[in-house]
Amino acid sequence: MVNHNSTSEIRALLETYGLSLKKRFGQNFLIDAGARRRIGATIHDELSRQSAEIGEVWEIGPGIGALTAELLALNRPVRLFEIDHGLIRVLRDQFGDSVAIEEGDFVRTVAAHERAAPAAIVGNLPYYSASSMVARIIESDLSVPVMVFLVQTELADRMEASVGGKDYSALSVLVQSHYTVTSAFHIGGAAFYPRPRVGSTVIVLRALPDRPSRSVSLRTSYIARRAFGQRRKTLRNTLRPYLAALEAEAIDPGLRPEQLTPAQFRGIACRVPENSPEELQ
């Protein structure tokens, strides 16, 4: 078994398998045992809130399995999604048949197969693609009760941002339309190998009981992105095709996007015909 706390042993492991870290995959392994235990405890607590005692736990980007070992202690079936074929060899040698392993990009893999939603999705997400990955999960048909992610602190701030704040964005609107968002704790760069230049945060997303349908969610996301694309302009300028919807929702078109709540963006979306975002003009 790999000593996930030792950078020298991790380097030796990678050398044994003839592997090198790929920057495009954002590979930063969590080498702090205390941080891993806290993440495992957080996931355990969230699963304990659920009435169902079954359901898989999905892990995105397990790397060499540092967090996977914590997940196996939950006594739930675990499914791993890993894009790096070299690391998949490491995972198979470590865990054998104790976990299911899906090869390839997470979003594409899930989209290509119909699956029951897991009890939870967790992962140490790559910084370069974390925001788009979270958005794609939420916009999909998956109804996931809880998600626990380790992400760049800047992204956690955007997901959790309050209306009117500098970090409030289209992503904030999308995430908060489906989930309550809570920052559990922060982790410094020294907890990772290689060491990132930024801090990280463990963030917990708990599903709201009245989440919008996929169709409404896609329209809400599109409208919010259109508005925040020129956030210094008023809605009268950025959402000109939807002024009737704003009027029906009693929303002042002289406002800027950061002044609208997720519920107000959702209200606008519900007034827009059910076309795909690409068809909205």
Image (cartoon, rainbow, N blue to C red):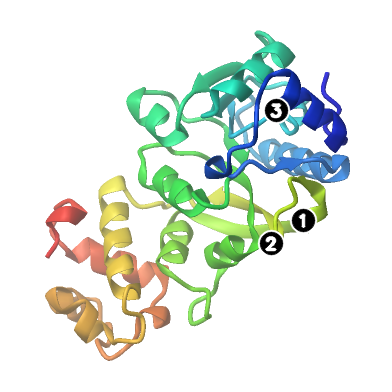
Chain-order first, disc 2 or disc 3: 3
Quarter of the image for residue 241 reads: bottom left
Callout 1 crowding tier (Cα within 10 Å): few <14, some 14–19, many ≥20: some
Instruction: Give the CA distance from mark 2 to mark 1.
Output: 6 Å
Image mark for residue 244: none
Q: Are marks 2 and 1 in contact (CB under 8 Å)?
A: yes
Residue 118 placement, left or right of 30: left
**Is residue 51 placed above or below 13 in the rendered structure?**
below
**Quadrant of residue 261 in the image?**
bottom left
Residue toward you, 17 or 268:
17
Outermost residue to the bottom: 254
Residue where numbered disc 2 is placed: 198
Position of 5 with respect to 276 (left or right) is right
Q: Which residue is mark 3?
A: 64
**Disc 2, SS:** loop
Q: Is residue 151 above or below residue 114?
A: below
Determine the secondary structure under disc 3.
loop
Q: Marks 2/3: CA distance?
A: 22 Å
State whether residue 207 is above or below residue 115.
below
Q: Give 89 or 220, whichever is nearer the viewer.
A: 89
Q: CA distance from mark 1 to mark 3?
A: 18 Å
